[in-house]
Amino acid sequence: MKSLSVVLAIVFCVGSTLALYRFPLKKSTKIHQTINENGTYEEYVQNKYNPAMANGDKTYSEKLNNVENAQYFGEISIGTPGQCFQVIFDTGSSMTWVPGEHCESAGCQRHKKFVCEKSSTCQPTEGGIGLSYGTGQMTGRVDYDKLCFGCQDETMCVEKQTFLESVQEPGPTFAAAKFDGILGMGYDTLAVKGVTTPFSKIMKDTVKCAEPVFAFYLNRQSGTGEDGGEMTLCGLDANHYQGELTYVPVSRKAYWQFTVDSIKVNAEKLSSNFQAIADTGTSLITGPKDDVDRLHKAMGTQRNPMNGQYMLDCNKLDLLPTITFTIAGKPFPLTPQQYVQKVKPIPTLDVQLCLSGFVGVDMPPQQGPMWILGDVFIGQYYTVFDQGKDRIGFAKAR
């Protein structure tokens, strides 16, 4: 999820009154690598999913940018006139925030700050909310203002949207990130203090939003970071996937949670009938530690006790197994080339090391055993979030 400018393209569907609006998703630096230098990825995910920390007929497309297959983000504007920000469209949260003008944290200094006084429609409050996105507690002031998906067009806008101006952003991750803030795409029930997400508001306008869905295509082949993929609102783009979509019901309307039939290492079943979450705001795939340890044992890899992740020799990828998730009776395989990522070369080593895309994380007791299917999975499978029918769809990405 990244920087670089966003290019707006408007495509009209032939023979239809529905318009398709596209904005680039960009890539950012590897958040899991940044976190490992300042903590562990396990802590990052545990904190994000800890409820105690969470106190916290047109188709529109938001292009995503991608840097090193880690974070994918696009543009929004807030205020009148609009102030433009790069945000992660995060299906693992339901709150929206951007840096505020009074924030003095290191994470705010390298990013654009929202200035309420420059917007004729901004309604500030004295209220504050604390949120966690894995690196610690972020605190912000509650504001209300006009919010638009994209910065060059005002087709997909909502009035008086609740959002936060951050006043404190913890840890070095936000300082190093190319994105400015977060726009939550989870269910409203996950939000703090009854806040409604921007997409939930847009769905109520059936003229703008004939189909209450959004979908993600993450471009894993982009080397520049500028063409990181696309998010569509209120419709799908069949050019981004092949075959039929496989849908599975949402099992709990908070996160985008669903039931997975099984996970197999080659032909050997590792686990069955478990819960998972499709999370565009998580770079890797996480699962219960025991399951992930057994998975890596089958790979012949060793866990780094310092950061909980698994490293391996990139030259031995062909020896690694295929990992297959079965969802709604349909297999969704991941090859080693898809779930393994190269890391920065270490001068003292003669081999190029790779990082496994699987990390062991035991969720807080309130959540129970859970797998998080982050960008490593979503990058291979076009993912549809159907809020109207409370289901998630997957198909092989083109």
Image (cartoon, rainbow, N blue to C red):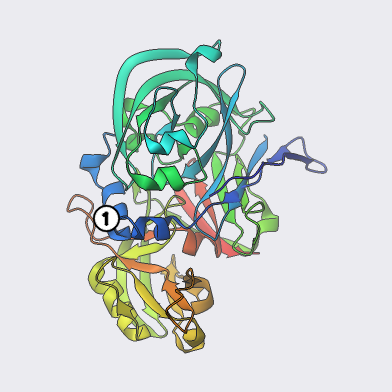
Q: Is residue 187 left or right of residue 6?
A: left
Extreme right residue here? Answer: 14
Q: Quadrant of residue 211?
A: top right
Residue 263 pos. (x, y %): 37, 73
Q: Which of the pair 348/390 is nearer the observer?
A: 348
Quadrant holding the C terminus: bottom right
Residue 289 pos. (x, y %): 25, 69
Q: Which of the pair 206/95 is nearer the observer?
A: 95
Residue 237 pos. (x, y %): 67, 51
Extreme bottom residue here? Answer: 319
Extreme left residue here? Answer: 365
Image position of 370 with respect to 24: above or below: below
Residue named by callout 1: 43
Q: Which of the pair 242/23 is nearer the observer?
A: 23
Residue under the image location 31 percent in, 18 percent down:
127
Image position of 12 with respect to 371: above or below: above
Extreme top residue here? Answer: 120
Residue 204 pos. (x, y %): 53, 27
Q: Quadrant of residue 355?
A: bottom left
Name the residue type under label 1.
Glu
How many numbered marks appear? 1
